Image: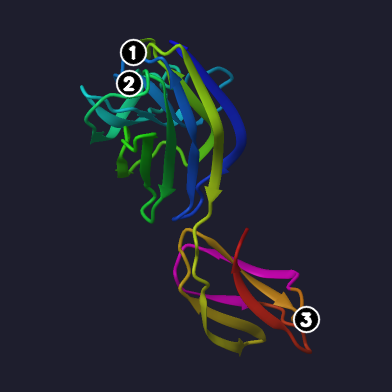
Amino acid sequence: ADASSIYSAFPEITLANAGDRIELTGSITLVRVTTGGENLRFGLFDVNGRADTTGWLGYFVRNGSGTGVASIMERAAGNTGAFTSTTGAANVGTAPIAGSVVGPTASTDTFTFTVVIERNATNGVLINSSLIRTDLVDFSPVVEILDASPQTFKFNRVGFQGTTGLNADQIQLTNVAVTLVPAVVAPPVITSMQFTAGQFEVGAVGMEPSRTYLLKRSSDLATFPDSVESFTGSAAHIFVDPSPPSLRAFYRIEPAQ
């Protein structure tokens, strides 16, 4: 298992709005480890249009140990290194950890791991990670590390590496999952409705500026098949239906999918 890497594709996830987050979870068993330095790496990546394993963007975790700290590494734009290489990567945050991943059970232990990347309201990302051994020691207790200028909000690969220095006979991965958790968005509040010069206007507030909202129209209040205006960019807006029906219509405002 020394100097081994594994990666897998998943349907592309984009953190399009503030509060959207991507979560990597699972468990990993390190069999007969003899060295516990910062040699286990795992993370979420964007292949960035590349056909090989170099030049990817994204983030990976390096475990903490008795001689170092856990760290979150970001792949730099234009890098030419492999996806978990520290060449072409910048350290965006650390967390201290005492002890070594060499565990109390004959140097073979299972860890649960997480990486959570969440887009914030200022177009940065907040990153959390953990690598928790069966005795509940966390070897990557990173909490809300801010990257104010992320290289990507798009992710389509998960990857792992055990470097030469890990000295593991085997690395076993179980129940690995990647999940998109969309932001919970409060609905907009309609503040006004009126006819103006033959048009019907609907005023609304409480919108998320980074989201696109639609003014939808219905003739029966059962379905809303007609999108009459879309809007992005502000918390308040007056939506306009330029050609309202002559008999009756019902309106609602909703986030675009």
Q: Main secondary structure of the magenta part?
A: strand
Q: Position of residue 188 (x, y in %)?
A: 51, 74
- At 67% from the left and 86% from the top, the residue drawn is 198
For the residues marked 3 and 2, what is the alpha-carbon distance in whole angstroms?
A: 67 Å
* Amino acid type, residue under disc 3 in the picture: Ser
Residue 234 within the segment the image draws in magenta: yes
Find disc 2 in the rendering and name its residue: 102
**Disc number lying in front (3 or 1):** 1
- Examine the rendered structure and indicate whether residue 141 appears above or below residue 186: above
Q: Earlier in the sequence, mark 2 or mark 1?
A: 1
* Amino acid type, residue under disc 2 in the picture: Val
Q: Secondary structure at mark 3?
A: loop
Find disc 1 in the rendering and name its residue: 34
Q: Secondary structure at mark 1?
A: loop
Q: Position of residue 75 (x, y in %)?
A: 39, 28
| Range of magenta residues | 224-240
How dense is the environment of label 2, judged by Cα within 10 Å: few (below 14), some, or many (20 and up)?
many
Q: Are marks 3 and 1 in contact (CB under 8 Å)?
A: no
Q: Earlier in the sequence, mark 3 or mark 2?
A: 2
Q: Earlier in the sequence, mark 3 or mark 1?
A: 1
Q: Are marks 2 and 1 in contact (CB under 8 Å)?
A: yes
Q: Secondary structure at mark 2?
A: loop
* Amino acid type, residue under disc 1 in the picture: Thr
In the image shown, does 222 or 238 lie closer to the viewer?
A: 222
Image quadrant in which the C terminus is located? bottom right
In the image shown, does 32 or 233 lie closer to the viewer?
A: 32
Q: Position of residue 46 (x, y in %)?
A: 51, 32
- At 48% from the left and 13% from the top, the residue drawn is 4
Which of the 4 image quarters holds residue 240?
bottom right
Residue 175 within the segment the image draws in magenta: no
Find disc 3 in the rendering and name its residue: 219
Q: Position of residue 36 (x, y in %)?
A: 31, 19
